[in-house]
Image (cartoon, rainbow, N blue to C red):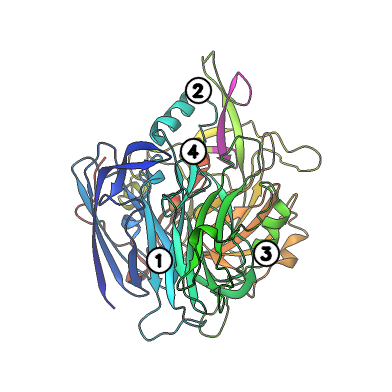
Amino acid sequence: AATRYYTFNVKLQNVTRLCNTRAIPTVNGKFPGPKIVTREGDRVVVKVVNNIKDNITIHWHGVRQMRTGWSDGPAYVTQCPIQTGQSFVYNFTITGQRGTLFWHAHVSWMRSTLYGPIVILPKSGVPLPFAKPHRDVAIVFGEWFNTDPEAIIAQAMQTGGGPNVSDAYTINGLPGPLYNCSSKDTFRLKVRAGETYLLRLINAALNDELFFSVANHTLTVVDVDAAYVKPFDTNLVLITPGQTTNVLLRAKPNDGCPPATHLMLARPYATGSGTFDNTTVAAVLEYYATAGNIKSRPLFRPALPVFNDTAVATSFVTKLRSLASPEYPANVPRRVDKPFFFTVGLGTIPCPGNPTCQGPTNTTMFTASMNNVSFNMPTTALLQAHYSGNAAGVYTTDFPTTPPEPFNYTGTPPNNTNVSNGTKVVVLPYNASVEVVLQDTSILAAESHPLHLHGFDFFVVGQGSGNYDPAKHPAGFNLVDPVQRNTVGVPAGGWVAIRFFADNPGVWFMHCHLEVHTTWGLKMAWVVNDGPLPEQKLMPPPSDLPTC
Ligand code: C2O
């Protein structure tokens, strides 16, 4: 196995989109940021240097970080932020994963511009479980804001209302021809007739799940969140923030006459009742070596579902199955040592002494919670507190294992207003087998929440609409080939059940990957204790770990 060294110099760079120029935080002046290319089993060493005025951390989203929680990156969870002028070396090994992940900043809303792909190739000499593609292309979805996202979220927190939405979606940083001023800022994928392309789809957008489709081309899904799946064909992909999806695109034997321009489009899947950016990003797929005047080419657009089509969203996600082959077995926990039931959703709290409160009512502001607890970020890192055995004043271990407030979907969505605040965690013994049922609740309308777990891949053993019924639903769980991933959409007005082995000692964040919901408190953390053997213990902290 090799060691791959990178230097990430975080600095401002002027970038113009939609005819609007901003000095945005970038890595090495690139937007989106550089691609990390590695193999399963390799060590990755990234020196991150902070040359901007804001605090920074980088999270290697989906990397399991076996025993190396210090390199996971969420600010105040596993580390104090890297301050201006300081640096920190992230050092971790890729274990048991192959496919696509991504890295992003993990403090406040800094990830709006600080993100890039992580490509994980199989170990050398190990073949892919599908025919080798001719080329490999990252398709990274993001959101562009004409004003500084840090100012947007600061203002929303002050007024208690929803933050302003983005001005465009982007593919590889480019909005594409359906936006003003953007026909030059279009990602173009040139393909050769008859060849196969592996598209590495990454949703790095802040706040929106996306539907994606390519005109006239069927896609074959082969891998999600760096775990192989049973291949299936589709015209449509649903991808939530925090998810990655590898699809094969087969270029046609010839592009017909006259040659055409095929659009690749993405736009939101949005439930809930808030405002959202309902615009469409386009990239262009076109063939090499086909004659004809580019201007007179016919233009094809794929059809995308309407923004709130939950039936289509459900039909896509329920097709996903682990490959579960002899080479890639699915190690699904069959027994459960630690069952949990968490409600997830938005809620409200009073606007203290704010006469112009802009929350759901003019006396309340938005909050978000799991089991009615809205998570308060501590001012020092949870992992350090855990490692030093000194949690007092940093966190408490009384996160409720079942919802303290009743929920019920019969009739109107449950009122989720009785929210408390705290920095509460759940402690797990080493290697416990854990099941978490996540149930959507809401204050206004049912809403899908892409829940992301750090430090683990989990199996999605069941999901459904309405209320979860512990007497009925477990009998239908898939323990044979459930999809394995790190981010799952809790269905709007429904539930999802996940299982994993707590085989990675440390402190692991779990949160909604819609950034505004994370800000509002839809987050919690697991503390996984060391096991008895030396190879079951969290490694000691690196000497350059930042201090708060
Ligand atoms: Cu991609 Cu905690 O995040």
Question: Does residue 491 appear left or right of residue 48 in this picture?
Answer: right
Q: Nearer the viewer, mark 4 or mark 2?
A: 4
Residue plotted at (51% across, 77% down): 193
Q: Nearer the viewer, mark 4 or mark 1?
A: 4
Q: Quadrant of residue 479?
A: bottom right
Report crowding for label 3: few under 14, some 14 to 19, many 20 or more residues within 10 A (C-alpha): some
Residue at the spot of label 4 = 167
Is residue 365 shown in magenta?
yes
Q: Nearer the viewer, mark 4 or mark 3?
A: 4
Residue at the spot of label 1 = 531
Question: Does residue 209 appear left or right of residue 102 in this picture?
Answer: right
Q: Which of marks 3 and 1 is in front?
A: 3
Contact, CB < 8 Å: mark 4 with mark 1? Answer: no
Q: Position of residue 32 (x, y in %)?
A: 36, 52
Q: Where is residue 351 in the image (x, y as percent from the top left)?
A: 54, 20
Q: Residue 318 carries which label?
A: 3
Residue at the spot of label 2 = 159
Q: What residue type is labelled 3?
A: Thr
Q: Is residue 339 above or below residue 194?
A: above
Mark 4 or mark 3: whose residue is earlier in sequence: 4
Contact, CB < 8 Å: mark 4 with mark 3? Answer: no
Q: Is residue 302 above or below residue 447?
A: below
Q: Which amino acid does label 4 sit on?
A: Asp
Mark 2 or mark 3: whose residue is earlier in sequence: 2
**Span shown in magenta:** 360-373
Q: Which amino acid does label 1 sit on?
A: Gly
Q: Is mark 1 on a helix, strand or loop?
A: loop
